[in-house]
Amino acid sequence: MRPELTIFERFEYVAILIVSLVLALIIVVVLSLLENIYQMLVAQVTGGVDYKMFQITFDILLTLLIALEFCNSIDAIPESKRLLVQVRVVVLIAIIALARKFLVMDLKEFEPMMIAAFALVTLSLGIVYWLLSKSHKL
């Protein structure tokens, strides 16, 4: 960075770098997703489809969705100066991340109390999101 930049310009520069890295991550994830879909199609033809392939594909797909939602939230920040909208987007990203965790988790690896804790956190985030949506309409 150049030293003659103001603090705000430096912040903008760092934000642009972060967004660029997220976009690069999205491209890598899309390529990985396409590779997994191709492998599933080949496995379907040969008759060797494994549930683990579906889990990996959904994992990549939901990671892509989280990254896209993150980019969308960064794009929405300048348009909406309201903190409530920003908090709602962060809660939505957390819900998507937990849904991803539920879809890819192997139930044999987790204790029932841990699964119940994930469910309680998901329910709590859902309630928070609902309350934020209701207060946004008021």
Image (cartoon, rainbow, N blue to C red):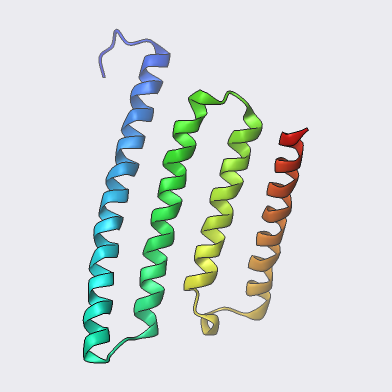
Q: Nearer the viewer, residue 101 or 50?
A: 50
In screen coordinates, is 91 left or right of 56?
Answer: right
In percent of the image, x 57 and y 78: which residue is there? 110
- Percent of width and height locating residue 38: 23, 72
Q: Position of residue 29 (x, y in %)?
A: 30, 56
Q: Quadrant of the C terminus?
A: top right
Q: Residue furthest bottom?
A: 47
How many marks overall? Answer: 0
Which residue is the extreme one toward the top? 4
Q: Position of residue 80 (x, y in %)?
A: 56, 26
Give above or below for 112 relative to 4. Answer: below
Q: Nearer the viewer, residue 100 or 117?
A: 100
Q: Residue 36 in the image: state x and y as whole percent.
A: 27, 70
- The residue under the point 37% across, 72% down is 56
The image quadrant where one finds the N terminus is: top left
Compared with 120, 69 (above or below) is above
Residue 120's quadrant in the figure? bottom right
Residue situated in front as seen by the camera: 3 or 87: 87
**In the rendered image, which quarter is residue 98 located in?**
bottom right
24 versus 60 height, above or below: above
Residue name at image x 28 percent, y 71 percent: 37
At 41% across and 14% down in the image, what residue appears?
Answer: 7
